[in-house]
Image (cartoon, rainbow, N blue to C red):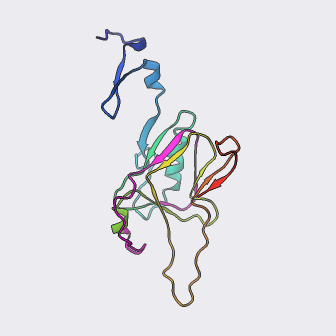
Amino acid sequence: AATLPLAGDELTVVVQSGVTKKTTIAGVQSSPASTSVMDARYGAKCDGTTNDSAAFAAAGASFAGKGGTLFVPANGHSCRLATGITLPANVSLEGVGLHHWSGLEFSDPEVWAASGSWIRCEDLVNPCVTINSTGAVIRNLNFIYAQPTPGVSWTPTAYPYTIAINGSSLSNGGNTYC
């Protein structure tokens, strides 16, 4: 049993999966944190209307130098990024993925947005998300760009890559685009 004050390896932490792990107090203080991009400190609304770009950038910057996870909820609306964002090193951008896709069109956002975490990309020049550093991760997110319904005089909109991975320090040694 641990005695007070706690020091060294006496601190026991219960991790999320239910498995316990011993660590030092310093180890707990340096563990990456997790926060929702909708946290009041950052101001993302993720209501499908508000431009959430600045809030995403601020949330990512708050983890710069220490790492962490930015969580994008499945709240029935998309998070709207009018300008692309860059993930700092060791920062994850994560959601709850897509539960079910029934071939719905973009014109029915209330239905498709309730089926997972969605980011609506609107930047016509820059990638929606750029990774320039090692350790950054994107997981369980859905990305969508607005595209008008094809018609007689319809021309498709050319968008940049959704995700750009840049830099010689990365494991692939160059640039990757998704």
Where's residue 141, x and y in %? 45, 55
Instruction: Say which quadrant the N terminus sits in.
Output: top left
Where's residue 173, x and y in %? 69, 45
Q: Determine the residue positioned at 38% across, 52% down.
A: 96
Q: Quadrant of residue 66?
A: top right
The answer to which of 80 and 138 lies nearer the viewer is 138
Where's residue 21, x and y in %? 37, 23
Q: Determine the residue positioned at 33% across, 68% down.
A: 111
Q: Vertical placement of 177 versus 26: above or below?
A: below
Work out which residue is located at the far front of the displayed protein and give it.
172
Q: Vertical placement of 154 versus 28: above or below?
A: below
Q: Count of labels shown?
A: 0
Q: Quadrant of residue 115?
A: bottom left
Question: In the rendered structure, which segment of residues is drawn in magenta?
Answer: 80-109
Tell me if 103 is positioned left or right of 58 in this view: left
The answer to which of 154 and 42 lies nearer the viewer is 154
Q: Quadrant of residue 25?
A: top left
Work out which residue is located at the far bottom of the displayed protein and give it.
152
Instruction: Say which quadrant the C terminus sits in.
Output: bottom right
Provide the major secondary structure of the magenta segment.
Answer: loop
Where's residue 42, x and y in %? 46, 47
Residue 98 colored in magenta in the image: yes
Residue 66 colored in magenta in the image: no
